């Protein structure tokens, strides 16, 4: 059984004193900011312990973030490979910083090739992991083409942004967070994760699915609050997600990934309209009675 040890820390939002300027006048008020702190991910194996990434994130769902990151990068392929996830308890680390270091202990004595993660030693919340992997690397990793289905009605897709926003409790308090949400093909919300970085939010969502033994997500839709980049598509592809929707535009490489691996990619989903960049065959028009042509 997977062990998860260490209490979850609070502190995903921080109070700040600000001056609001309006109509030529200034007033002082208390505001909430989304917390941003570094988190170090350490891999613990029979061969020792190694730092594989440091990412700037919003505290919360840290174990899911670590698991989702390792899964998305192909370091682990199943929940069974993870023996324990815990916060650092090293005596030379102060109490506050222990909650910024997550140890992921893997089972067995398997050798893990971590050379591909050298580019991930430092990542930012804005750009996620720096140093883009190529389309060819996804193919070499053995990522399969997403199988056909499910079909999703345009009405269901129209409804996703509002459902996502309603589920963003921390965004409501701070106004400064991205989110990734998992839906079924009928538009029912299954899970939402928030973070100052959209890539981290997606890792948290995939990590949740991994630790809950829900992978692959072959009948689901993922909705992200910002734009869809190569890395968002990469993370969704490894989780088997067939449909990815975003409020803003996709990047050119995101479109390439979607087309190469049979995914449906929706962008500019807002105001009762959306663009389909790949996988048009999964979209049902109107009430879902006629396939899109």
Image (spheres, rainbow, N blue to C red):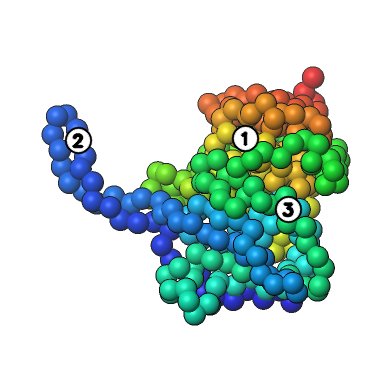
Q: Residues within 10 Å of mark 3 (few under 14, many from 20)?
A: few
Tell me the SS state at disc 3: helix
Percent coordinates x, y for residue 50 in the rendering: 65, 65
Q: Nearer the viewer, residue 105 or 153?
A: 105
User: Which numbered disc flags the more N-terminal residue, 1 or 2?
Assistant: 2
Is residue 24 shown left or right of residue 162?
left
Do the residues under discs 1 and 2 have CB atoms within 8 angstroms? no
Place residue 265 in its image quadrant. top right
Which of pointers 3 and 1 indicates the residue nearer the eye?
3
Residue 17 lies, with reference to residue 162, above or below; the image says below
Q: Is residue 260 left or right of residue 61?
A: right
Q: CA distance from mark 2 to mark 3?
A: 50 Å
Q: Is residue 103 above or below residue 134?
A: below
Please state which of residues 276 and 93 is positioned toward the viewer in this rendering: 93
Disc 3 target residue: 115
Residue 146 position within the rendered picture, expressed as x and y whole percent measured from the top left = 83, 41
Number of other residues with Cα within 10 Å of mark 2, as a class: few under 14, some 14 to 19, many 20 or more: few
| Disc 1 target residue | 228
Q: Earlier in the sequence, mark 3 or mark 1?
A: 3
Instruction: Tell which circle, 2 or 3, labels the residue nearer the N-terminal end.
Output: 2
Left or right relative to 277: residue 138: right
What's the CA distance linking mark 3 and mark 1? 26 Å
| Residue at left offset 63%, top offset 73% | 4
Question: Secondary structure under badge 2?
Answer: strand
Q: Tag 1: Cα neighbours inside 10 Å, few (<14), some, or many (≥20)? A: many
Residue 21 badge: 2
Q: Residue at x 56, y 50 (%)?
A: 122
Q: Residue 101 location in percent, x, y?
A: 54, 66
Residue 110: % across, % down: 82, 68
**Secondary structure under the numbered disc 1 in the rendered image:** loop
State the CA–CA distance, disc 1 to disc 2. 34 Å
Q: Nearer the viewer, residue 60 or 47?
A: 47
């Amino acid at each position: 059984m997977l062990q998860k040890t260490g209490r979850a820390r609070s502190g995903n939002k921080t109070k700040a004193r600000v001056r609001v300027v309006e109509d030529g006048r200034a007033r002082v008020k208390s505001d909430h900011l989304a917390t941003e702190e570094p988190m170090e991910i350490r891999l613990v194996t029979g061969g020792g312990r190694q730092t594989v990434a440091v990412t700037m994130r919003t505290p919360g769902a840290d174990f899911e973030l670590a698991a989702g990151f390792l899964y998305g990068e192909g370091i682990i392929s199943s929940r069974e490979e993870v023996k324990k996830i815990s916060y650092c308890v090293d005596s030379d680390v102060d109490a506050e910083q222990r909650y910024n270091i997550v140890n992921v202990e893997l089972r067995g004595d398997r050798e893990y090739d971590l050379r591909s993660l050298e580019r991930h030693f430092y990542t930012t919340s804005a750009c996620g992991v720096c140093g883009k992997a190529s389309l060819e690397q996804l193919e070499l990793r053995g990522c399969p083409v997403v199988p056909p289905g499910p079909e999703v009605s345009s009405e269901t897709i129209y409804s996703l942004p509002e459902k996502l926003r309603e589920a963003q409790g921390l965004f409501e308090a701070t106004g400064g967070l991205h989110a990734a949400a998992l839906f079924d093909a009928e538009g029912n919300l299954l899970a939402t994760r928030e973070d100052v970085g959209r890539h981290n939010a997606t890792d948290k969502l995939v990590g949740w699915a991994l630790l809950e033994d829900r992978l692959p997500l072959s009948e689901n839709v993922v909705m992200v609050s910002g734009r869809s980049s190569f890395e968002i598509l990469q993370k969704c592809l490894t989780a088997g997600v067939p449909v990815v929707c975003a409020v803003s535009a996709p990047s050119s490489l995101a479109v390439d990934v979607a087309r190469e691996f049979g995914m449906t990619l929706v962008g500019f989903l807002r105001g009762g309209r959306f663009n389909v960049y790949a996988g048009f065959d999964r979209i049902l028009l109107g009430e879902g009675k006629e396939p899109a042509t």
